[in-house]
Image (cartoon, rainbow, N blue to C red):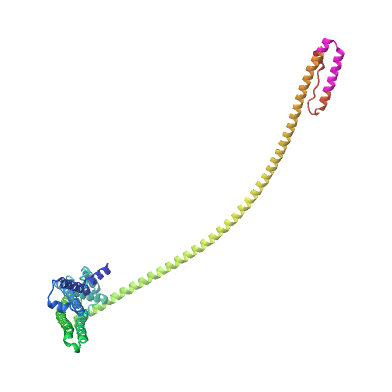
Amino acid sequence: MIELSRIQRSVTRSPFLWGGLASAVFYWLVHTGFLSGQFVERYFVSHPVEYAATIMFFMGLAALGVKIVDMLAQYPQLSQPLLGPVSASGRASDNARALLKRLQVLSAARQHDYLPRRLRDALDHVRRHNSAESLDDHLKYLADVDAARLHSSYALVRVIIWAIPILGFLGTVIGITLAIANLAPEALENSLPAVTAGLGVAFDTTALALGLSIILMFAQSLTAWAEGALLEQVDARAADEMEGRFVQISAGPGGQLEAVRRMAESVVQMSEKLVQRQAELWRVSIEDAASRWNHMADTAGERLQIAMAGALNESLHTHAERLVGGEQLIADSNRRHWNQFQQAQVQNTQAMAALQADMARQADVLMKAVQASGEIAGLENSLNRNLAALSGAKNFEQTVMSLAAAIHLLNARLEELPRSGAAVTLDPGKSTGQAA
């Protein structure tokens, strides 16, 4: 924010800005016809050198105008008390700090004025030395510095006042060169207007440059005189503001007593500084010891942490190895049990397959027995029919022979069945009864 205000102040006080604007307005008025006439056309717009001399003249006037405005703004401060009522109680450095704070309430634009700056430099000198013994000499030194600063502030104007006649001489050289270049002895009457025009440029630019430089010189002298008078008033006002604000030692017995008192105050202040220094050293020592203790505690804690971490890692590693071994044993036991279970399953499967095959064979035998039973029942039916037929024909002997043959055939069929099958026998009682 301070840098921005400084840049804004530099731009608003720039003579190049205001001089360029003034030149632009002037030539706009000339070229639009508001300012016209033979004098204006002859001395301001007839040659580029006249343009350059005029623009430099306006820049010099702008620099002087900025200084005049600045001076007019500083005069009201000369009639106002900037530091307030006089109060010499307390130490000089404390009073100087309090007065410096009062100066800080001024606006940023007025902080660079002669009187506030003079008072601020004087108070800063008292604050730094904690004494007002050399205040008068320092005020004189500040007055000389402001005078030198005043003289250097007109450097641009002095350069412009020096450069404008140089431009006029340059225009003279250019005009004479044009006149000589246009001069033709064999046609003197025809070349005379061009020669006259060249000489006119030479004399007009010189006259313009000398006239503008004279105006700037008088304006600079008047402005410098007014600013010098302002500085004189600032010197008197600064002396009035600083008078009686700080206790100074005078010559004579009273001055000697004051010097002794000041020396005693200095001794007390030095003692206070020594005590503060010793307290600071103690504080630093205690802080250093505390820092070392903290460092040792941190180091011990780190070592303990590292040791515990190592022991814990080793314990975890051993436990992990044991867990891996236990898991391996359990896995092997489970694998053996699973193999045994698989073998038992295979054996059960084989036994079931054998049982299934045996049951298939038993079922086949049973089917054959059923078929044989069916055949036997058919033979019995046939035999009963034959017996019935024989009894009707009374051929008993043939019937008995047929019956014997059927029995032999049936026995032969039964012998072909497996031994495990159930034996099938004929009930002679039934057969006889049926035959009867």
Q: What residue do we see at 60% from left, 52% from top?
A: 323
Count all numbered tags in the image, as a single digit. Answer: 0
**Magenta stretch, main secondary structure class:** helix
- Could you tell me which residue is drawn at 17 percent across and 85 percent down? 190
* Quadrant in which the C terminus appears: top right
Look at the image and tell me in which quarter the N terminus lies.
bottom left
* Residue 340 rendering spot, x and y as whole percentages: 69, 43
Q: Nearer the viewer, residue 61 or 33?
A: 33
Q: Where does the magenta region start and end? A: 388-410
Q: Quadrant of residue 33?
A: bottom left
**Rendering coords of residue 365 (x, y %):** 76, 28
Compared with 30, 363 (above or below) is: above
Instruction: Please indicate whether residue 55 sits to the left or right of residue 354 in the image.
Output: left
Q: Is residue 341 left or right of residue 69?
A: right
Q: Is residue 426 magenta?
A: no
Give the quarter of the image for residue 234.
bottom left
Is 408 colored magenta in this rendering? yes
